[in-house]
Image (cartoon, rainbow, N blue to C red):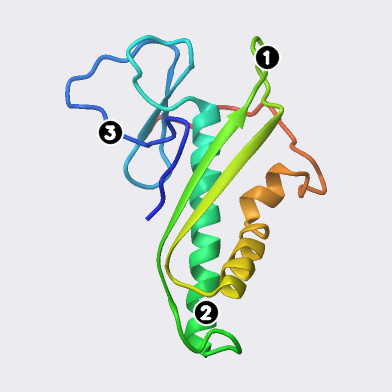
Amino acid sequence: MSLLGSGAWLRRLPAGSVLRDNCRWLSVGSPTVVSATEALEGDEGPSPKELVLAGLASCTSMTVRIYADNMFRRGAKGWESGRLDRVLVHAEEITRPGAHVPDCLEVRIALEGDLTAEQRRRLAAAAERCPVKRMLTGGLAGGVASALVEPPSRA
């Protein structure tokens, strides 16, 4: 279970909701999510920045969970006992007043379960290998390329 911070909850709109022009439908599997600009009244959905924070928190939680499950399942040295019950992750942006781009992103991880200090240290190190974090901190060799394309046909 992940706690996604800074308002980064993805939520469904009630049936019959009216959306303003500056809202965007995002279809990434199910359910469909609505993204809205931060200045929008009515809080129709998470802002694009909040979606990034949600992705970072979610990926961090999954990375830690997969690492722990693998170590316990294999019975790796130092992992013969103990358990990880929950991983709680809070991600938020640290932004100066008036700035639009965050100075940094802060990720806080809480581990619940019967874990040794060494297991906790190794899980914290595993969190540093989260693919979304690596992408956000310069892990894209080719940068980000944008291109104008024809819209898909509405068949």
Label 3's element?
Answer: loop
Label 1's element?
Answer: loop
Please state which of residues 14 and 101 is positioned toward the viewer in this rendering: 101
Label 2's element?
Answer: helix
Work out whether mark 2 precedes mark 3 in sequence or the reverse, and give the earlier one.
3
From the viewer's perspective, is residue 20 above or below residue 150?
A: above
Label 2 neighbour load within 10 Å: few <14, some 14-19, many 20+:
few
Please state which of residues 47 and 64 is positioned toward the viewer in this rendering: 64
Q: Quadrant of residue 21?
A: top left
Instruction: Please state if 14 lies on the left or on the right of 40 as rendered.
Output: left
Residue 55, horizontal then vertical, whole percent: 52, 44
Question: What amino acid is at disc 3?
Answer: Arg
Alpha-carbon span between mark 1 and mark 3: 29 Å
Label 3 neighbour load within 10 Å: few <14, some 14-19, many 20+:
few
Residue 20, horizontal then vertical, whole percent: 36, 11
Q: Which residue is mark 1?
A: 99
Label 1 neighbour load within 10 Å: few <14, some 14-19, many 20+:
few
Residue 35, horizontal then vertical, whole percent: 43, 26
Residue at the image point whose x is 48% and y is 25% from the top: 47
Q: Which mark is residue 70?
A: 2
Residue at the image point whose x is 50% and y is 35% from the top: 51
